[in-house]
Amino acid sequence: HCNALHIDATVATTARSALEDLADAGICFEDGVDCDESPFPRTLADEAQSHLQSFASSEPTSNPSQFTCFARMAGRELDVDAEVMRGVTMRDTLKGGGCMWYTSPSKLTLKQCEHRWARSSPCESYDIFLSHTWMTPGVGKYLALSLQSGWFVAICFWALGVALTVTLCILRLLPVSAQMPETLAGRHVVTLPTAPWTILASMIFLILGFLVAPYLPLLGRASDTCFLDVACVCQSDRELTERGVYGLGGFLVRADELRVLWSPPYLTRLWCVFELAAYRPANPTGKISFR
């Protein structure tokens, strides 16, 4: 993934050194003819000469990027690339029934990638860094995050639905389908009307609350700017993709919380292990939570 990036001085120096080592080993390229003692075929030697000399003759750029993959491999894994740092609200990831969670980036069309990228916006820090694997079905992650972030709205909708239903039953605006047998309460005999409306309203309004919660303003709730790879790392531009991938360490530095969406395949994925292992060195005061 590095061939689209600028060649820095380290690469050119390495290429020159490789040519010198080949010459010391008796593999020389004088006038296009390799030495008799060279064990390599002429075509292979010519190809090696062409590639190495092109690297060796390349001059470093006047202002090489500090965020190239070469720089990242040189001990700058936690540098923050602010130019590609983007965040998306937790609410936006849950809109539309959580459709953003259902398809792996590798299976998205170009238009879908651009649509998800447009949902994010530049930011300076993250409240939550969402660490997960696309090997896990998205419906479970959507339900878990909906419960964590939308429970208060859902409870409010449930209470409103129950109160409204009871009121309509009392006013006889909803039919009572059956009555319980007469019950002795002290010295008074009472009849208790029954109907399924309250139970049905509880279920409907509770589900409706979870679905509506992402579309409501925070209303005193904690800020929810988060990092989600499919929306915050550009999937349609190769250079931006590389900078986003190699910038994950820097994003961890700016995240207040690493929220691990745990599943059995989680520790089998290299990037998940990297995020979990790198977060504490990157952010000693940050919070790690497993959900």
Image: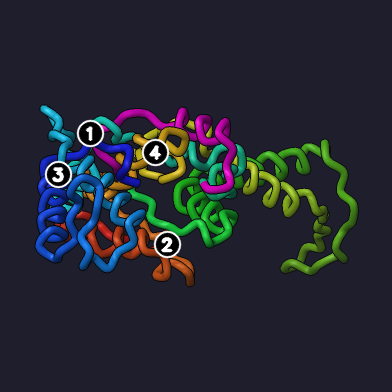
Q: Are marks 2 and 1 in contact (CB under 8 Å)?
A: no
Q: What whole-number distance in Å separates the C-alpha atoms at marks 2 and 1? A: 28 Å
Question: The C terminus lies in which quarter of the figure?
Answer: bottom left
**On the rendered structure, is 70 left or right of 276?**
left
Q: Residue type at mark 2: give it.
A: Arg
Q: Are marks 1 and 4 in contact (CB under 8 Å)?
A: no
In the picture of the structure, the residue carrying the numbered disc 3 is: 12
Q: What whole-number distance in Å separates the C-alpha atoms at marks 1 and 4? A: 12 Å
In the picture of the structure, the residue carrying the numbered disc 2 is: 291
In the picture of the structure, the residue carrying the numbered disc 1 is: 82
Give the mark nearer the N terminus: 2 vs 4: 4
Q: What whole-number distance in Å separates the C-alpha atoms at marks 2 and 4? A: 21 Å
On the image, the x and y values in percent for residue 77 come to 19, 51
Q: Is residue 283 at least partly visible in the picture?
A: no
Give the mark nearer the N terminus: 2 vs 1: 1
In the picture of the structure, the residue carrying the numbered disc 4 is: 232
Q: Are marks 2 and 4 in contact (CB under 8 Å)?
A: no
* Closer to viewer: mark 2 or mark 4: 4
Q: Residue type at mark 1: give it.
A: Ala
* Closer to viewer: mark 3 or mark 2: 3
Tell me, yes or no, whether the highlighted magenta stretch contains residue 245: no
Q: Residue type at mark 3: give it.
A: Ala
Give the mark nearer the N terminus: 3 vs 4: 3
Kindly identify the residue that appears in the image at 83 percent across and 40 percent down.
174
Q: Which residues are magenta?
A: 106-127
Q: Residue type at mark 4: give it.
A: Cys
Q: Secondary structure at mark 2?
A: loop
Q: What whole-number distance in Å separates the C-alpha atoms at marks 3 and 2? A: 47 Å
